[in-house]
Amino acid sequence: MAYFWISPFRAGPAACRCVHATILSQPMSIGCPIPVSVRIGSLLVAAFLLGCQEPERDRQQEHHAEDPYSANVVLEPLMPMETGPVYHVIAGYDPKWAELVREGVERARDYWGSYGPTHVWIAGTDEGATLDEITVQAWLDEYCTWRTEGTDIPFEFCLEHAREMFIDVVERGEPEAYLSESRETELRMAELVFINVQKWYFPEDVIPDPVLRGIHEYTHVFQLSVGPMPTWMMEGGAVFAESWLPAIDGQRDVKFNMERILERAKRMGDPNLTIADMESIETAPPHVAEHHMDLAYDSGAWATAFMVHRSPTRSVSDLRDRFYPLVAEIGWEAALPRYLDMRDTQEFYDAFNAFMELSAQQQVGMLDELKP
Ligand SMILES: [Zn+2]
């Protein structure tokens, strides 16, 4: 399934949509939530559902004797790899867009560690330009050669899908950024997709949004090396990284984005919902999925900061070096209370909900106490 942002949102975090399962086959078995959450106003962001069409039944059976999208399938984590991601950029696209994405991806890789195999696919057209058929064919061939290797996915099937996935989006002029993963290959692989990167770029931004999107999506690559974790922890961790990495690099105060995120989290449309309702976007009922942006991204980012603050060292790098390895070892539901010396996850949720009742001044002040 996939969510994407149509309009860039400038003052907030680098919005992303994340694909937790795709792509050349059907994600229906893990459900298709309908998070048509449309934000209007300063955010002007729309998340739509994409790519949950059910392909023909015979086709899917032909491809998957065992359904790789079943929630019951436990996937092997991504592996530590010395070599970095392989970058693919469509011909004719101004290299500066790929450079911005790469800057973010590599900054995050430097921080989180190098995992993969990871491929980064960057496509778009510059203002006034169009894609010619030779460029399109070369791109689709490059993608499908990689994507079908070692699988039983027919090349033609991939071409058809990839055209929708890349070319149609480029031509519609829509920006997209997401992580998806290949589950059909023997080795699990991550693919990061960035389309029409120029749409996120505004010269006045201190940190260009394409850089933040690179940070966000690569953080998910790291998370996939750890193992399963709830949606709020995954998205919240990535959104928090967008604020934290520029802050420790001295580029921008951590509060810059976090304050805006907090405002949105506090404006959450349904006061009865909390991050505890957002453990799995795949299985969330529609009334919860509708608020997945507020819950997973906005509240999730603050839940991540809160988690660090409640940890013994208040160190963000300990999140990487101690907490996530603990998740890999004993699972997130055991790791979270153990790391925070709490009884269970409910105690964490209760503590976080109480924190969210504090004044904004107290909440934002907490960020000053976080340590690298
Ligand atoms: Zn994400």
Image: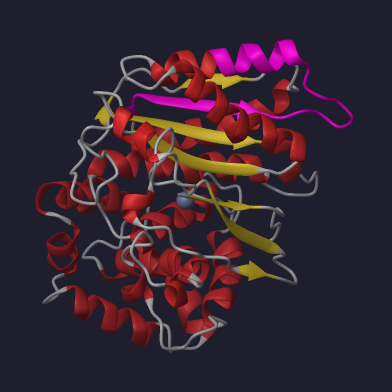
Q: Is residue 129 magenta?
A: yes
Task: Tell which of 92 and 163 is nearer to you.
Answer: 163
Colour scheme: secondary structure
Q: Is residue 353 above or below residue 130?
A: below
Number of marks in picture: 0
Image position, residue 45 (x, y; %): 67, 62
Task: Tell which of 50 and 19 is nearer to you.
Answer: 50
Using residue 134 as the reference point, say whether residue 109 is left or right of it: left
Q: Which residues are magenta?
A: 114-141
Q: Residue at x 54, y 48 (%)?
A: 246
Q: Residue at x 74, y 49 (%)?
A: 205
Among the 4 quarters of the image, the one containing residue 195: top right
Extreme residue toward the front, this view: 58
Decide if residue 128 is in sight here. yes
Image position, residue 42 (x, y; %): 74, 69
Among the 4 quarters of the image, the one containing residue 269: bottom right
Decide if residue 196 is in sight here. no
Q: Residue at x 72, y 10 (%)?
A: 134
Task: Tell which of 239 and 131 is nearer to you.
Answer: 131
Q: Is residue 235 above or below residue 300?
A: above
Q: Residue at x 19, y 44 (%)?
A: 73
Q: Is residue 293 magenta?
A: no
Using residue 1 as the reference point, say whether residue 318 is left or right of it: left
